[in-house]
Image (spheres, rainbow, N blue to C red):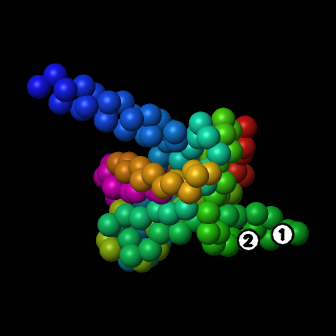
């Protein structure tokens, strides 16, 4: 029994360590109006080691993608990106006007006050992937959120 408890404690310690590599704070999804087919997801990521955000999924949408908005001359442009770099010790805001997640092909209207499951996949320098499952609150259409504006690396 003691050996099983020690083994379980070791497994839990390793699991906690793996999950501590990337912290996610202030995640939220913008509410939608009826018939709307897409919306944005925003959050702050902090990684203890170099890595990159390489995947995202949710049962609320048929597709989830990483996007980046930036100014090109006098025009704001949005484009899909394959991944988002996470530098060790530097925070990355996924916010309006910068990097963010788009949920496309929504299966239903998302209403303020609901919580939506979302899984992000982070790949470390060693190419090992970690899945982080979040419960993300849906905020009103008018909610701006912390870190709104261009993506900030600090």
The residue tagged with tag 2: helix, strand or loop? strand
Q: Residue at x 56, y 57 (%)?
A: 127
Residue 7 percent across, percent down from the top left: 25, 31
Residue farthest front in this picture: 3
Q: Which quadrant is home to the C terminus? A: top right
Spatial CA distance of label 1 from label 2 is 7 Å
Q: Nearer the viewer, residue 82 or 61?
A: 82
In the displayed structure, would residue 143 be above or below residue 15?
A: below
Give neighbour class at mark 1: few <14, some 14-19, many 20+ (Cα, 10 Å): few
Residue 55 percent across, percent down from the top left: 50, 63
Principal secondary structure, stretch drawn in magenta: strand
Mark closer to the chain start, 1 or 2: 1
Q: Residue at x 32, y 30 (%)?
A: 10
Residue 110: tell me if it is visible. Answer: yes
- Is the residue under label 2 in contact with that under label 1 (CB below 8 Å)? yes
Q: Which residue is mark 1?
A: 72
Q: Residue at x 62, y 63 (%)?
A: 83
Give the magenta range. Answer: 111-121
In the displayed structure, would residue 28 be above or below residue 99?
A: above
Residue 8 percent across, percent down from the top left: 24, 32
Query: Is residue 132 magenta-colored?
Result: no
Q: In the rendering, which numbered label is found on residue 77?
A: 2
Residue 84 percent across, percent down from the top left: 64, 58
The residue tagged with tag 1: helix, strand or loop? strand
Q: Which quadrant is home to the N terminus? A: top left
């Amino acid at each position: 029994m003691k050996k099983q408890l020690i083994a379980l404690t070791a497994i839990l310690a390793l699991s906690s360590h793996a999950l501590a590599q990337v912290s996610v704070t202030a995640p939220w999804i913008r509410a939608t109006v009826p018939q709307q087919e897409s919306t944005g997801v925003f959050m702050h990521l902090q990684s203890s080691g170099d890595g990159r955000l390489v995947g995202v999924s949710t049962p609320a949408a048929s597709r989830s993608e990483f996007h980046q908005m930036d100014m090109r001359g006098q025009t704001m442009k949005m484009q899909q990106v394959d991944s988002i770099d996470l530098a060790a010790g530097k925070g990355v805001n996924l916010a309006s006007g910068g990097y963010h997640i788009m949920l496309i092909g929504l299966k239903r209207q998302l209403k303020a006050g609901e919580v939506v499951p979302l899984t992000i996949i982070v790949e470390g320098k060693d190419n090992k992937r970690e899945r982080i499952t979040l419960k993300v609150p849906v905020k009103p259409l008018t909610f701006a959120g912390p870190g709104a504006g261009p993506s900030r690396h600090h």
